[in-house]
Image (tube, rainbow, N blue to C red):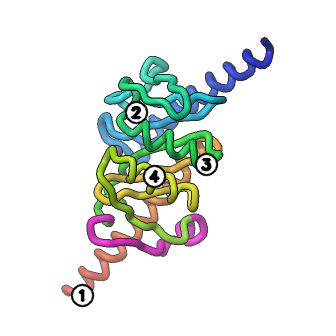
Amino acid sequence: MAKAFKARGIVVLMLESAIETGKRLAHQHLIDGSSGNLSFRHGLKITITKTGVMLDSLKPDDFVEVELGKRDPKASSDLAVHQQIYDETDYNAVIHCHGAYNVALSFVEDEIVPIDLEGTIFLKRIRFIEGRFGSEELAERIAKEIKEIGFAVVRGHGIYTAGRNFDEALKLAGFVEHSCKVYYLTKLFSLLGRLR
Ligand SMILES: [Zn+2]
């Protein structure tokens, strides 16, 4: 009984952290409108945002609990990706967000090597992967990338990150978008310099 009570307490804390993470994603310009999704693992279940909810103003009702490996039509359309990540890794929190700079760069590059300090330390390289949205192949590709380096960036779409908690996953998403922004601006400035 005490064990079940403690487990429920962890779910409440993770839910609070998920709601806070939604606000921070909006603050960091990593989501817009009802884009993006979040989930966390607890025991043999995951709790994930429902489809179409606004991440910047999440309420407990905006989440649905799904058993590991199962599907639920109320859940985010990215549920299969989250399930695949939990299946292949020990991470407990997963974030999917967008961010203009990584999406823009993904159209012109296959891979970049970050030039800012944090990027060179924590990311090493950012590869833009491809696949049809909603397909099993893409879910597998994203999970494989996350297993290897903790994050994945899908061409024309955005970032997936995972961590032991939401703070870790959010930090990584911020690093990816910041590195892409610095890379993009540096490239732009060098091109403008050549025009002068
Ligand atoms: Zn998306």
Q: Which of marks 4 and 3 is nearer the N terminus?
A: 3
List the residue tagged with mark 2: 55
**Above-or-below relation of 48 to 95:** above
Q: Residue at x 33, y 44 (%)?
A: 134
- Residues at marks 1 and 2, CA–CA distance in whole angstroms: 41 Å
Instruction: Give the foreground label among 2 and 3.
Output: 3
- Residues at marks 1 and 4, CA–CA distance in whole angstroms: 42 Å
- Residues at marks 2 and 3, CA–CA distance in whole angstroms: 24 Å
**Above-or-below relation of 22 to 121:** above
- Residues at marks 1 and 3, CA–CA distance in whole angstroms: 46 Å
* Classed neighbour count for the residue bearing mark 1: other residues with Cα under 10 Å, few (<14), some (14–19), many (≥20): few
- Residues at marks 4 and 3, CA–CA distance in whole angstroms: 12 Å
Seen from the viewer's position, the closer of residues 82 and 6 is 82
Taking the magenta stretch, the answer to whether it contains residue 107 is yes
Tell me where residue 15 appears, x and y as whole percent: 56, 26
Tell me where residue 191 appears, x and y as whole percent: 26, 81
Seen from the viewer's position, the closer of residues 32 and 140 is 140
Q: Which amino acid does label 4 sit on?
A: Glu
Q: What stretch is highlighted in magenta?
A: 106-122
* Classed neighbour count for the residue bearing mark 4: other residues with Cα under 10 Å, few (<14), some (14–19), many (≥20): some
Q: Quadrant of the N terminus?
A: top right
List the residue tagged with mark 3: 89
Q: Residue at x 33, y 56 (%)?
A: 131
List the residue tagged with mark 1: 194
